[in-house]
Structures are given as C-alpha cells and as structure tokens.
Image (tube, rainbow, N blue to C red):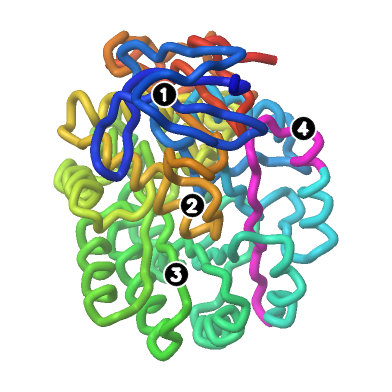
Amino acid sequence: LEHDLVLEGRVVTPRGFEDLEVGVDDGKIVEMKHQGLKGARRIRTGRGLTFPGFIDVHVHLREPGWEYKEDFRSGSEAAVHGGVTTVADMPNNRTPATNPTLLMEKRRLADEKALVDVRLYGGVQAGRLADLKEMAPLVAGYKLYLARSTGGAIFPETELRAFFREASQTGLPASLHCEDQTIIERMEAVLSGQRRADLYCDIRPPQAEVSSVRKVIEALRGFGGMRANICHVSTAETLAEVRRARESGLLVECEAALHHIFFNRKAALEDGLLRTNPPLRPESDRRALLEGLKSGLVSFLVTDHAPHTEEEKRSQGLAGVPGLDDYAHIVSWLIREQGVSPDVIARVASSSPAKFLGLDDRGEVAVGKRADLTVVDIHTPVKASRDQVRSKCGWSPYEGMVFPGGARWTIGEGTVLLDDGDLVT
Ligand SMILES: [Zn+2]
C-alpha cells in the first residue's frame, strides 16, 4: 500500500517527540509508524520538527475593500511562509463584515483565492444582536471592538451582558478587543501637545486594557457556557485578571501577539513602524506574556497580522503590524532562545486554537486528523528580509533580524504548499 505522501522525521505529539513516519492520503493522516511506510512522495524532514499545522485565530486579510494592503491570496501566501495552515479573519474590513451578505461575499473570495483554510469572525454592532443567530452558520465566532481601532464601530460596554446572553445561545465564542475608549480619550487630552516617539504607548496605557478586561469579565458572569477570548493581551495585570476569572469558573481565553512577546516599548522609540493597538509595553510585561505562554495562561499565539503599507504607516501613523510571514521565525526564537518547549508551541499554535474555532479535525498530528502539518527547522538561521515577505504590504517588523530558523515545509490538507522553504504556487 502506497500513500500519497510520507513525512519522515521528528514529530511533536502530546506525549513529546517521536521519530515517526506519517502517511497521508486524500488530505488526511491515515497511518503513523516508526518505519516501513511507502509513499508516492517521501519528505525527509531532517533536523526539522513536525508540528500540527499552525492555526492563527487573529488575522486581518483586508479583503474585500483594502486589497492594496492584502488579499486572501497574498495573505495566505504569507501564512504558508510562516507555517500557518488555518487562519481566522477579523471582520473590520473597509465595510465591516457584520451581516450574512457580507460574510458570504468574504466566504466566496476566500474559497476562490486562499491557499490555507480561512475561518471568519462576524462583527457585532450595537443594537444589532438579532444578527448573531443569522451570522452563526457562517462564522467561527464573533468579534467586538470596545475601543476605536482600524475600521469598525465601538461596541458599548453597557450592552456586553445582552451580547453574552444572546451569543451564549449560539454556542460560538467571542473575541474581544479590550481597551477602554474613555481612558484613551482622557489620555489624548492630557498628553495633547507632547511629541515623543513613544507617546502612543501612553495614550493607550495598560490601565485602558485592564479596565476594559475587568468590565468584560464582570459582564460574562452568569453565562457559564460562553467562551470569551481577550485579544492581544499586552500587560501582566490583564493576565492576572484572566487567571482570576478562570479560577472563578469562567471560560476566558487570551491571546499573545508575536510583537508583544518579542518587542518591548523601547523598540517603539527606535521604530515608528511598530505602532499597534494595544501598544508595546515595558520589558516586565513582555516577560509576563512569555511566562504566561509557558504556564498555560496564554491560550493562543497569534499574529494579529494587520498589514498597512509602509508609506501609510509613516504618513498617517496607522496602527497594526504584519506577522504571518514571521510566525515560524518567532516560534524558532521561542524554542531556541526563550526556553519554550515544542509541546507548548503545539498547544498555543495549534491544539488550543483548533478547539476554540470548533475544528476538531485538526490541531494534533494523529491518525484520522486533517493532514495540516508544519515542519520548522530551528537549526538553520534565517534573516527576516523584505524580499522574502509574501504579505502584500511588503515589509516586516523584524527586518534584518536573524532567527534560529523558520518553516521548511507547510502542508495544508495533504497538499505541499511550502516545499523545503520554497512557496509552491
Ligand atoms: Zn486585530
């Protein structure tokens, strides 16, 4: 019996490492053995580590409306380059995806153009809670913005309980961008007239995030089955709130974004391109995120891939940085230089995201699962550079930095999308 594809090498499983042959047929993992599998194609992964395909629950692929920044094709090429086989796309398009018509349009475009599996979030508008049930069949979850960011209207804190009541009926989770708009506006007034490179970090201070997170957690009480995900946590205090909420029995998840775990606010002084919402934080917060990743407090490692062109970043000061191209670079850095073990990576980059999105066909290298596989070589240093970037925005926050390695093979549903480092198109 010959399989379509056999991968041979070191596999990251829930039990640690195993040297295995993974047999793939018709997009699924059908057999795993120590040796003896035959395949029409055999990939020897050498010093690479085979992970379940990475799943990024927070991206902005910008289509439709802002295709000059990114589209489903270019964004998914960046994902493949970074070892990401499933993404969940946020609804803050030029016209926010807050109803079934717009979501169906996104579905059609993604199905036509994307190289990886794209899941969608439905945007939630104030006073439109009746839309939740209508959107449910089209989305993996809901997204709420509690502060002003790129596109999308602010969802009022006063409607959070009503939202959770309605959303809990659908069984779908919600992701929340938590910053307190009142605090941001107060800080804008207090700091107006000041000019310094890291001013933005103070206009959107840690307290704005923590205050918003507390309100979300309060509003969640009483809706036991509702799963809420705090997006891009940037401060140690938020992590403490998440821990307390979980201890009290609430289903609260949280994300760490690549840039918050890699940079501290000193980097914002040196590079104006690093403006994000929420902004970069002091080193103590960065370390807390790293510890949270290791301890299980952080549920998901995400990019919050938010491409803008370099020109509009510089001229308009737009917030958001790309990240998909660099996902596996950061993974290699976490493993080699920050003491994060590969099984932690498999959890935050694949198995937990799969559960959150309701995708029980993936998230683990196991027989019967979808053949989404990412081979990361952590022993061949690579320099992040713009000529490697596949995102249409054409730049990387990590430009010129050398990482211990990157994605070598990316396999989506049995199809080799990245082959020994080269994108297959
Ligand atoms: Zn985002």
Which numbered dot is residue 113? 4
Q: Nearer the viewer, mark 2 or mark 4?
A: 2
Question: Residue 48 appears at what percent x and percent y?
Answer: 34, 18
Task: Return the residue at label 1.
Answer: 21
Q: Quadrant of residue 170?
A: bottom right
Circle 3 sits on which residue?
228
Q: Amino acid at mark 4?
A: Lys
- Give the mark nearer the N terminus: 3 vs 4: 4
- Whether ligand 1 has any atom under 8 Å from the Cβ at mark 2 is answered as no
Mark 2 or 1, nearer chain start: 1
Task: Please give the name of the residue rendered at 44% of the width and 69% of the height, measured from the top-left corner.
Answer: 228
Q: Which element carries disc 4, helix, strand or loop? A: helix
- Callout 3 amino acid: Ala
Q: Earlier in the sequence, mark 4 or mark 1?
A: 1
For the magenta stretch, what is the residue range? 109-127
Instruction: Please indicate whether residue 58 sits to the left or right of residue 142 in the image.
Output: left
| C-alpha separation, residue under disc 2 versus residue under disc 4 | 22 Å
Disc 2 to disc 3, how far (Cα)? Answer: 15 Å
